Image: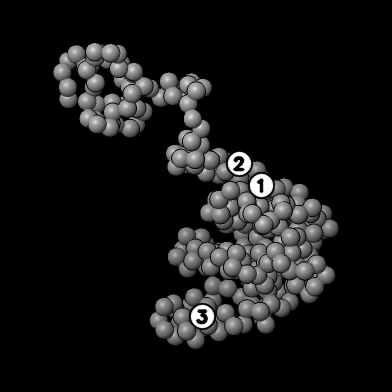
Amino acid sequence: MGNPEDARIPEGAQIPEGAVKPEEQRMGPVLRRRDQVQPGTTDQRLLDSEGDSEWVHTDPWRVMRIQSEFVEGFGALAELPSAISVFGSARTPAGGADYEAGVQIGKALVEAGFAVITGGGPGAMEAANKGAREAKGVSVGLGIELPFESGLNPHVDIGVNFRYFFVRKTMFVKYAQGFVVLPGGLGTLDELFEALTLVQTGKVTRFPIVLFGTAYWGGLVDWLRDTVVAGGKASEHDLMLFHVTDDVDEAVRLVTKEVGR
């Protein structure tokens, strides 16, 4: 552990010329010994204005950013009323059948007493936010930093932008009582299967998932039944974790019934 003289050198301090470098250094909860002992202290590095800025790209700093995203999300949404998350493609064209269905679903959810949460983007997400806003409900958008997205759509009343997908997905589940899933691409499938996994494993309970559009989702349902379940990779009961419908009123009834509203 070094000789007694070493103990008189302040923890982590710059080692004076001629002094013996300590073999042990405690920096907060981190212990460094032997060759891993670093010169200087944490305060010295914090206050050193001449240091480089590469530290903002290190994992410990990313952890702080991740923590801040959770804090901001929790703070913004903690007082949100009962809500349903609506997913769907950002590429859904305005005026199309899927877009109009999204508008009607947004309206119907508000009329049933829910706030509406989407990914805040264009397409189906914009449609659901638009419907919620037109029905004078709470319209929430949880955006994500992407190189090809242009920010939150104009129908969002409460918006939070995230850097990290996994933080954003936590918000979708934590502050919603169910999902309505419109036709969508890989991002929509990611959100759908995240929710299905959480329900299947009991991580969340009483969480209805409604797929809107039988023609669109039929092939996926067939594959789950005829390949995944038939091959023993899931159980027949797992097919009951979600509902498929083409009717807006039925979609709202299903989420309302399962959350006890």
Location of residue 95 with respect to 23 vertically, above or below: below
Return the x and y of residue 197 as percentages of the image width and height.
49, 66
Can you say which quadrant of the picture contains the N terminus?
top left
Location of residue 2 with respect to 248 vertically, above or below: above
Q: Is residue 112 visible?
A: no
Residue 139 relative to residue 167: left or right: right
250 and 4: which is toward the camera: 4
Residue 190 relative to residue 88: left or right: left
Residue 19 relative to residue 153: left or right: left
Which residue carries the number 1 mark?
Answer: 160
Spatial CA distance of label 1 from label 2 is: 8 Å
Location of residue 227 with respect to 173 vertically, above or below: below
Residue 72 disc label: 2
Q: Kindly identify the amino acid type of the residue bearing the numbered disc 3.
A: Leu
Location of residue 103 with respect to 119 vertically, above or below: below
Identified at 33% across, 23% down, the residue is: 39
Spatial CA distance of label 1 from label 3 is: 34 Å
165 and 211: which is toward the camera: 165
Return the x and y of residue 128 as percentages of the image width and height.
75, 62
Q: Kindly identify the amino acid type of the residue bearing the numbered disc 2.
A: Glu
Q: Quadrant of residue 246?
A: bottom right
Identified at 64% across, 54% down, the residue is: 147
Q: State the colouring used for the structure image.
A: one colour
Q: Is residue 248 visible?
A: yes
